[in-house]
Image (spheres, grey):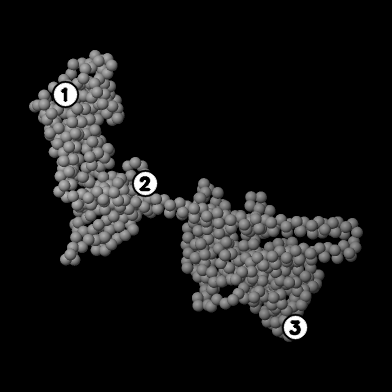
Amino acid sequence: MGWAVGVCNAGGVGMAGRRAGARVAMAGARVQLADLNVPDVNPIQALSHLLQEERERLARLWAKRLRAETYDVEVPGRDLRAPLRRLLDELARLLRDRPDDVVRLWPEVVRPHGAFRYTQNFDPEDLTREFKSLEEVMLHVYARRNGGFIEPQVAELVAELVWEADAAAQASYARILKTEEVRFREAAVMESVLNQVDVGIMLAEVDGTVSFATPPVSRLMGVPMRAVVGGRAANTINPVLTQVNARHLTGEPFRLADMPFLRALKEKGPVRGVMMVVERPGGDTATLELSATPVWEEEGELAGAIQTFTDRTEAVNKTKALQSAHGELRRLQGRLLQRTRQQALGQLASGAAHALNNFLNVLRLRITLLQREFKPEHLEALDKTVQQIGELVARLQEFNIQRTQEQPTDVPVDQTVREALELARGELEQREHPVYVDLDLGDAGNVRADTGFFRELVVNLLLVSRDRMETGGRLHVSTRADGASWLVLRIEDEGTPYAPDELARLFDPLRRDASAPQLSLFLAVARAQVERWGGELTAEVPASGTGTAFVVRLPRVHEGAVSTAPRPEPSRAELMRPTGPRRFQQTRSVLVVDDDLDNARMMAEVLGEEGYEVQVAHSPAVALGMWDRRRYDAALLDAVMPEMSGWELARELRKKTPQALLAIVTGMDVRGQNRANLALVDAVFRKPIDVGALDDFLGQSDTAVASENGASTSGSAPPA
């Protein structure tokens, strides 16, 4: 008989049996070919019983295996098992009715199957995979029924039937292909050309039926598109999109309605540049660009649409690499902004500390000598040393002024905040515990400042807030208009809130903090910068009681205002010029407001000895309460206090007593203050204070003020 096998012996099985055994191993079936004491089994009867009892299981496993081998798509309404079940039925009939001729007749039964697969756009390789899958499934099911053993005769029969069938199907496929090529030579040449190009082309009818797809479409999508051709898009394309996990670049699922050819048919116009990401069966991800153009009949009627598929994976990967490099550059730039400022501040602080230590050493030695023996020259030397310290501080302030003498412009706050966030984003998010930013920008308008320094200020405040959240979290950044004249920028973190005493010392440039030695120095410089723009920088605990908020308050530039050249810095005389004759009696009662009690008490003691009645307030709130209980002739206000600045306090006192004499006492430079603030006070004194100039200022009479009509007070210390 045609299915006779080779002679079995202790050395092994025949050639067909060894080939079948290899196929079993590939299928993963746990079987064993019996090569010793082979029982006398009739392979025809064995296979006939197998097909009669396991036909449905064989069809199901064969379809599943075929789908895995060819990456076929399961489309609703298309039964992949039907043609396979018919082949198994025919094989079972031949084994039952024509057992002697089954090997000869079976290929003739299979021959039409090759022609059928051609109409379904199968490739010749797919036919081979189909029959290889049949062999593996039959041996697998037989082994399970037979306790894991496959007789060599059965294995040889299965192998011979399968590969004879494959040869017959391939011959039928080739004959039809040759006939089609001869009959449609031009179309075959065109299809061959389209198969070689890198762009996939798909044609769709007006009703959405896909009528043609070139092989590159299947190659680019990673699954065969034969199931799509000839079917309505609504029924066939959705399963394809699901199988390849199609999605947009944003990660959202790619839906049928997003297909360009459907949009082109609906909108009757071209649709270009639609990007789709697919996951191919091999595990790689591809990015495809889809475009569609409608096709028109000569009569002007819509005939369909052409959709192209182009692989943009390499371009997208390069773009991602460039974006990553750009992000790293922004991160490094943000870090450089912070580190450059910190290094400069550190060097400045180190040099200033060295000079101050020298002066302090001289002071201590002079005080020691004075304690041992009083001599006038010791007091003169002490006074000289104090003057030298004041000159050193003035030089440091001059250095800071020169460093910041840029051209102020109208700065769009919201835009600059976004730019600062882009610079700092890498430092914020590329960490073990990332910090993300919630923006709430209220289109608050412009401020008059230096663009570069303002952007740097925002970057550094973002990084300072980030450092307070070691486990990550979110920053809340908002901008708001505060009335018609002011703009507020708020940066709120989720870290541990500062205690009240910490808030009071946060902007102290000489604060000793082992955990962040340069933080207060940076914040002091930042506050001075904001004050030069006429604004305020404060820190507060939000009403929620969690985190800390840094608040920048700056004057708004009114719409329609014309930007002019930067105004010149006011001179010393301008800063000391009274605004007009407010006093109606000689000054006797003075209120000194300073959060540093030692400074306030010493000032009160010195002025008391000059004959003034002096009271001390250690905070603006206390000062306002004392002022309500009693109106003072004059007030000396520290510029920098935690609750309220001296400028704000001056504004409140001026409302209560317009004729009072008000002066700012500060160690900071105020030549950048806006003129609205300067107009609130009658003079500015810089620490260390020249007591003689202060006495002249307080001792002036209303007649003198009126006669000077704006002249500067003599003998006052240069303002800071």
Q: Residue at left 28%, top 58%?
A: 292
The local secondary structure at tag 1 comes to loop
Camera-nearest residue between 85 and 631: 85
Q: Earlier in the sequence, mark 1 or mark 2?
A: 1
| C-alpha distance separating marks 1 and 3 | 133 Å
Vertical arrangement, residue 7 with respect to residue 198, above or below: above
In front: 472, or 71?
71
Task: Please state which of the two labelled residues, at mark 3 or mark 2, is closer to the viewer.
Answer: 2
- The residue singled out by tag 3 in the image is 704
Q: CA distance from mark 3 to mark 2?
A: 86 Å
Residue of label 2: 285
**Marks 3 and 2 close (CB-CB < 8 Å):** no
Crowding at label 2, few (<14), some or many (≥20) Cα neighbours within 10 Å?
some
Task: Give amino acid for label 3.
Answer: Ala
Mark 1 or mark 3, whichever is nearer to me: 1
For disc 3, the neighbor class at 10 Å (few under 14, some 14 to 19, many from 20) is few
**Amino acid at pointer 1:** Trp
Determine the secondary structure under disc 2.
Answer: strand
Mark 2 residue type: Thr
Depth order, front residue of 490/118: 118
Left or right, 351 with respect to 430, comes to right
Q: Which part of the image, by quadrant, shows the C terminus?
A: bottom right
Give the percent coordinates (x, y) of residue 440: 47, 62
Residue at the bottom extreme of this rendering:
707
Q: Nearer the viewer, residue 202 or 256?
A: 202
Residue where numbered disc 1 is placed: 3
Closest to the camera, between mark 1 and mark 2, is: 1
432 vs 317, left or right, is: right
Q: Mark 3 vs mark 2: which is more N-terminal?
A: 2
Please report whichever mark, 1 or 3, sits nearer to the chain's N-terminal start. Answer: 1
